[in-house]
Amino acid sequence: MKYLFLAADSVIVFITACLFGIVSLIPNSSFLILPFVLLFLLINIIPSPLNFKFRKTRLRICAEGTDLLLSFLIAAAMSLAGYIIAAFFLLPHAALSFFISAAVTAAVLSVVFWNGIIRVYLTSVQLGIKIRVIGILCGLIPVAHLFVLKTIISTCRAEVEFENEKEQLNAQRRDRQICKTKYPLLLVHGVFFRDYKAVNYWGRIPKELERNGATVFYGNHQSALSVADSGSELAQRIKQIVSETGCEKVNIIAHSKGGLDCRYAVSHCGADAYTASLTTINTPHRGCRFADYLLEKTPEGVKNSIAKSYNAALRKAGDDNPDFLAAVTDLTDKNC
């Protein structure tokens, strides 16, 4: 059914584009296009009624944008083929009419394209910055822009289908609370980041966990300190959560340097009594050779300058006393 709507949309866009081109050349013929103009406007507002199945407005708009881009591609291919054939009959004796009609057709097709691209750029998560920038840079490069557009369409279609299935799954298992654990979760970020409310370090993971029954807390520790200092902060945070909620213990999930910090909190700061489990993700337990390389190759003056700038900036962002060099040094092979 979805493909039938897509095919119908593409044909309507194609006919409307061609009729606009014809009407622009023939006086008093606008009545020919009125029904298709109305359908064209409807398509640009609601490409397919099937998209109303999506529970989230963002997903519906993204799906509509993808449909519009596919319709644009199909209609543009049909228009190109049509004008190539027409060229044999209209050129060169009717060159002006031919090119005016082609220009008007291109303008109509561009309405569909921009409607679609704006929708997916504003609503897609998986496109990311990289694909968006590539799309802008390659937009005017022939052939290359087709490959980029294909990537944009396939990425958005996969995102919409996956997230919609996930929404349906969450709705079906809402009562099962499959992520509800005996003790709450404590998410601990890595180095050079903070737990901001506006931009979540963990992306959409915490919300998914909570929707499925989990209770989630955050480390709320500073972005860059030595392992010992971060461990001390986290131990205090764990004790605070236990004291305020009466949960007795927490399950820690720590990323990157956060894993080292939590290991220290558990083994040296008394957090072991309040920790049910510690899971580390991408933690450099045996050290990060890149940290060794940076400290070895970077001149002392440059290191100090970077550290000073970072520490000053993060104080303004909310850290009490960040220490860039201590954090990097504790990531070296030797210190780990």
Image: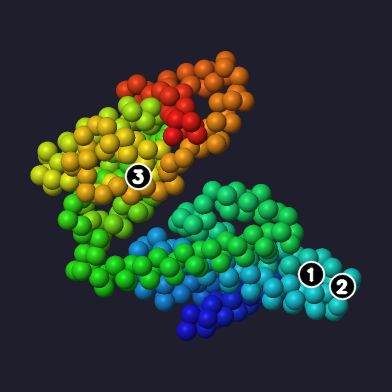
Contact flag, marks 3 and 2 (Cβ < 8 Å): no
* Residue wearing tag 2: 91
Residue 163 placement (x, y as % from top left)? 40, 65
Q: Earlier in the sequence, mark 3 or mark 2?
A: 2
Q: Residue at x 63, y 77 (%)?
A: 15
Report whether residue 154 is seen. Answer: yes
Horizontal relation, residue 169 to residue 224: left or right = left
Q: Secondary structure at mark 2?
A: loop
Q: Which residue is farthest right?
A: 92
| Residue at the disc numbered 1 | 98
Please give the label number shown on residue 253. none
Q: Nearer the viewer, mark 3 or mark 1?
A: 3
Res 254 label = 3
* 90 relative position to 290: left or right: right
Name the residue: 52% across, 83% down. 4
User: Which of pointers 2 and 1 lies earlier in the amino acid sequence?
Assistant: 2
Q: CA distance from mark 2 to mark 1?
A: 8 Å
| Left/right of residue 118 with respect to residue 138 in the rendered view | left
Vertical arrangement, residue 215 with respect to residue 256, above or below: below
Residue contact at pointers 2 and 1, CB within 8 angstroms: yes
Seen from the viewer's position, the closer of residues 293 and 207 is: 293
Q: Above or below — where is 222 with respect to 65?
A: above
Please tell me whether residue 135 is drawn above or below residue 234 in the rendered image. below
Q: Amino acid at mark 1?
A: Phe
- Say which element carries label 1: helix
Q: Residues within 10 Å of mark 3 (few under 14, many from 20)?
A: many
| Residue type, mark 2 in image | Leu
The residue type indicated by label 3 comes to: Ala
Q: Position of residue 299 (x, y in %)?
A: 60, 19
